[in-house]
Image (tube, rainbow, N blue to C red):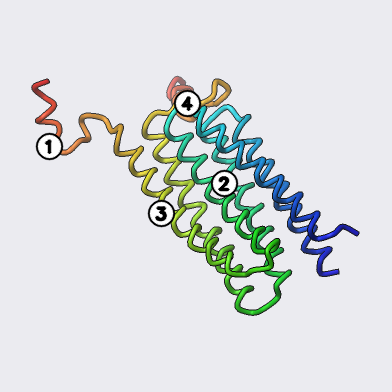
Amino acid sequence: MIELDVAINIALFLTITGLVAGCIRMFKGPNSADRVVSLDFMTVLMIAITSLLALQLDNAAYLDLGLALALIGFLATVAFARYVERNSKRPDTKPAGESSSKSHE
Amino acid sequence: MNDLVVSVLIILGGFFAAVAGLGLLRLPDVLMRMHASTKAGTLGVGLIVLGVAIHFGESLIVTKALLIVIFLLLTAPVGAHLIGRAAYRTGVPLSADTLRDDDVMSSRTSDSQDP
């Protein structure tokens, strides 16, 4: 029979391993889509870490932190994905103002 | 008994999180990395939050934990779809082993048009 504290420590170690992997991918990522993927992944893993902290410290208020982190992480993912997509559109799909300003370059 | 169930759920969730991180490091492509991180990561976090809900066992905390799980299950596909669409439209280079659907479609249509 395994103790609960040992299980919490093992789960924290495994989760932080995944978080370090996401961090390495964010540094190495060849383009910005990789970095958005790793940001989303790290936000999800931070929810897991706050839940494990709620277990270890025996304080259920950390679950509220996880809920807020889930909301903010989704908004950040959507915003960064829109930013990446808008930042590299082709010139013929740009609005009229930008294409006219670029035409005399 | 309760602690045993919670321990198994937590360690299984941590295992899935570590496997998702390994896939995020080792897979060769943006879409494959997204496949690893989104699905395995969401499953791992869902298992961990479920274990926390079983450990506390009060109705308010169980409601909060289920809210986290439902919100993650709702938003993870939407976020992954947006990232995948952005990666596809910005022309991120795919892995060399990828079979492009355009080639298959053009070869099939040319085969059907030849005779």
Describe the element under mark 1 as helix, strand or loop: helix
The percent coordinates of residue A57 (x first, y second) are: 68, 63
Q: How many marks?
A: 4
Of B97 and B65, nearer the camera is: B65
Q: Which residue corresponds to mark 4?
A: A30
**Identity of the residue drawn at 49% across and 30% down:** B101
Of badges 1 and 4, the one in the foreground is 4
Of B1 and B76, nearer the camera is: B1
Alpha carbon distance from label 1 to label 3: 29 Å
Residue B86 position (above or below residue A45)? above
Q: Which residue corresponds to mark 1?
A: A96
Q: Which residue corresponds to mark 2?
A: B38
The amino acid marked with disc number 4 is Pro
The percent coordinates of residue B1 (x first, y second) are: 86, 69
**In the image, is A30 to the left or to the right of A101?**
right
Same chain for the residues under marks 3 and 4 in the image: yes
Alpha carbon distance from label 2 to label 3: 16 Å
**Identity of the residue drawn at 54% across and 24% down:** B95
Of A50 and B63, nearer the camera is: A50
The percent coordinates of residue B70 (x first, y second) are: 56, 64
Cβ atoms under marks 1 and 3 closer than 8 Å: no
Label 2 packing within 10 angstroms: few (<14), some (14-19), many (20+) = many
Q: Chain of mark 4?
A: A
Q: Which one is earlier in the sequence, the residue at label 3 or at label 4?
A: 4
The amino acid marked with disc number 2 is Thr
Label 4 packing within 10 angstroms: few (<14), some (14-19), many (20+) = some
Q: Can residue B59 be seen at all in this image of the molecule?
A: yes
Q: Which residue corresponds to mark 3?
A: A75
The percent coordinates of residue B105 (x first, y second) are: 46, 29
Label 3 packing within 10 angstroms: few (<14), some (14-19), many (20+) = some
